[in-house]
Amino acid sequence: MKVNLRVWRQDGPADRGRLVGYRVDDADEDMSFLELMDVLNEKLILDGGEPVAFDHDCREGICGACSMVINGQPHGPQKATTTCQLHMRHFRDGETITVEPFRASAFPVVKDLVVDRTAFDRVIASGGYVSAPTGAAPEAHATPVPKANADRAFTAAACIGCGACVAACSNGSGSLFLGAKITHLGEMPQGQPERTQRVVRMVAQHDAEGFGGCTNTGECAVACPKEIPLDVISQLNRDYLTATTGGRRTA
Ligand code: FES
């Protein structure tokens, strides 16, 4: 299949950047989108041009590195699918596809499609440690966890920190990511001792990094390749309110 690509090229953070058109004549419908970008880059290199810089690592939907906006949607048009798991059969032969970086003030462009997402790392680090004892794996029933809490913690733990939620949000908010991290630990007994200080520190770091506030548009949950539910933001807000007002925790 043939596709026309309009790819964001930007030499560095100070460059204004622009969309550049390329044609790929030998795409295959079974290729992933990253493999399409590989084909484009091989062609560019053979022609003496500079390959398009883009992030990737696992190519299995695990690491969250493959951050691209494809035809206006973070990770492209397929629901619950990362760019590396997106296949060309979801595009039409002859289609024009626009590829841009995740855009948010907290994710400055490094080059082409690569953005700096270390703000997420700093938000995670600000949460501090969990003071649960470590060592050999404990007996499975040593710490009882209600099924509903375990399920909710697992759902939140599916967040791969890709940043699609931020790219989809008109406010550039990282609230879905933050809510997932807060819920992940807040649902487990091991996450209780530092629960209050963790949410206060992480919200402060989130705001200091330049992420916007949440206005409940819900685009984040739609764009999330791991289908993190919007109500983790409710959990985040409840925990923050409890921590900052000394109120009684309700969930
Ligand atoms: S490259 Fe790891 S999730 Fe896509």
Image (cartoon, rainbow, N blue to C red):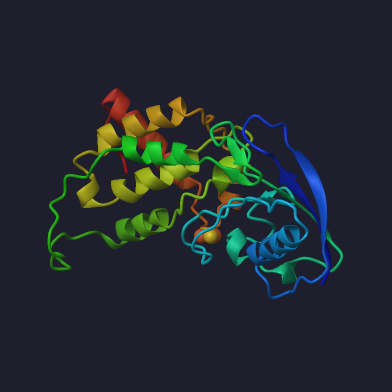
Instruction: From the viewer's perspective, tell me whether residue 232 is left or right of residue 39.
Output: left
| Up-down relation of residue 48 to residue 103 (above or below) | below
Picture coordinates of residue 93, whole percent (x, y): 84, 69
Where the N terminus falls, by quadrant?
bottom right
The residue furthest right is 94
Give the side of residue 42 with respect to residue 231, left or right: right
Q: Which quadrant would the C terminus be assigned to in this image? A: top left
Instruction: Name the side, left or right, on which 211 lies relative to 27.
Output: left
Residue at the spot 60% in from the left edge and 38% down from the top edge: 109
The answer to whether any part of residue 81 appears in the image is: no
* Residue pictured at 62% horizontal, 33% vertical: 13
Q: Quadrant of residue 38?
A: bottom right
Instruction: Residue 53: give x, y in percent of width and height.
Output: 63, 50
> Residue 140: where, in percent of width, then height?
17, 68
Residue appearing at x 62%, y 42% in the figure: 111
Residue 34 seen in render = yes
| Towards the viewer: 164 or 227 | 164
Identify the residue shown where x is 67% and y is 39%. Answer: 11
Q: Residue furthest front?
A: 48
Is residue 167 shown above or below 62?
above
The x and y percentages for residue 106 are 53, 33
User: Which quadrant of the view contains residue 118?
Assistant: top left
